[in-house]
Image (tube, rainbow, N blue to C red):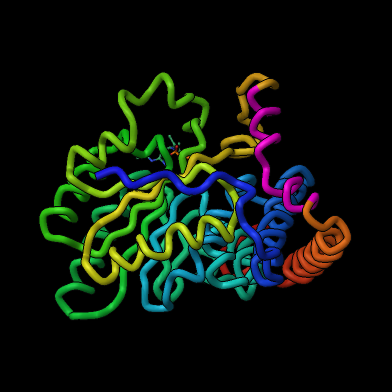
Amino acid sequence: MTLTDQAPPGTAVAPLGDTDLTSLLMIRHFEWKLLDLFAEGKLNGTTHTCLGQEYIPVSLNPLLSAGDFVFSNHRGHGHYLARFADPAGLLAEITGREGAVCGGVGGSQHIFRDSYLSTGIQGESLPVAAGAALHFKRAGLPHIAVVYIGDGTWGEGSVYEALNIARLWELPLLVVVENNGISQTTPGSVNMAGTVAGRARAFDVDHHRVTGNDVRGIRDELAPLLDRVRGQHRPLVVEFDTVRLGPHSKGDDTRPEQVIESARARDWYGALREEDPERFDRHDQEQRELIARVAADVLARPLVAGESA
Ligand SMILES: Cc1ncc(C[n+]2csc(CCOP(=O)(O)OP(=O)(O)O)c2C)c(N)n1
């Protein structure tokens, strides 16, 4: 079944609350800071920023309970920060410093904390999430399993095995697809036949497409749908039509400038600023300073055992 698209952007009435605005800006400044630190040669390994996609976990977070299990992916900083508001723990993890959320062994892509787990292996988490959802159902717990995947991850067979079982066994599974139209350097138009909606439909799994980036509208739209996942154990695919503002990882953006420009034109950052520039700038500055302080503090900490600068 295909559910109706959400209301067009711009229909929300109430101003965005401080918590949401702070969360969005904290994630944005965290990601900007990471790219700066890479440019300064202060980070090892790789990282994938969620620039442009921050509004997705910020919209979803209040709809989730602490017992719901969130499975994230390689582009997961926003998923983690929206849930835990812990930039210091994440940055310490990425830089292998004391206070790291996973002792510095997980890095950017492999984070475990409470009911939150991320993996850099595409498609790996969906069957595991289905298993968690099965446990919730069997144990009579009111929780759901939430898994974030990209559009390119629909190239993995495990996605289909998990959707099949989730529908057949009626599992409380929410698949959040961050469809930014590109997988590393390959546009979706050359690697996906059909659509995400059509693929969900093939398994009789509900699908809902979100086209706007207004946190308030998205949340209102999704709340009843998530209630159905939770209460009636109807698996659901929510596909966000979103934008990746930055490169796949760091320097690997092969998109034509025009494509990047049109992604920038859809960014929530400018649109939200226009609503109330004075308030936005105040929060923006606060989060920029907060992340600068966090980075200075974390980078001054000793490395955890076994790490090298
Ligand atoms: C099984 C597997 N194959 C290849 C990779 C390398 N890889 C990492 S991210 C990525 C592209 C992912 O694209 P998508 O799912 O659309 O997510 P996005 O990066 O756009 O958020 C690839 C090919 C991987 N991590 N895992």
Q: Position of residue 177 (x, y in %)?
A: 41, 46
**Residue occupying image coordinates x 28% and y 78%:** 142
Looking at the image, residue 67 lies above or below residue 22 = below
Q: Residue 234's image quarter? A: bottom left
Q: Nearer the viewer, residue 253 or 197?
A: 197
Inspect this view and state whether residue 296 appears: no
Q: Position of residue 68 (x, y in %)?
A: 37, 72
> Regarding ligand 1, which quadrant of the image does it lie in?
top left
**Residue occupying image coordinates x 37% and y 78%:** 67
Queried whether the magenta region covers residue 230, the answer comes back as no
Q: Position of residue 259 (x, y in %)?
A: 63, 24
Is residue 154 toward the left or the right of residue 275 in the image?
Answer: left
Q: Residue 89's image quarter? A: bottom right
Q: Nearer the viewer, residue 137 or 75?
A: 137
- Secondary structure mostly taken by the magenta-highlighted segment of the chain: helix
The image quadrant where one finds the N terminus is top left
The image quadrant where one finds the C terminus is bottom right
Is residue 55 toward the left or the right of residue 231 in the image?
Answer: right
**Residue occupying image coordinates x 40% and y 51%:** 176
Inspect this view and state whether residue 293 appears: yes
Q: Position of residue 263 (x, y in %)?
A: 64, 33
Q: Nearer the viewer, residue 208 or 258?
A: 208
Q: Residue furthest left?
A: 168
Q: Residue furthest right?
A: 278
The total number of labels drawn is: 0
Residue range of the region highlighted in magenta in the rendering: 259-274
**Residue occupying image coordinates x 29% and y 65%:** 228
Q: Residue 217's image quarter? A: bottom right
Looking at the image, residue 13 lies above or below residue 75 = below
Queried whether the magenta region covers residue 269, the answer comes back as yes
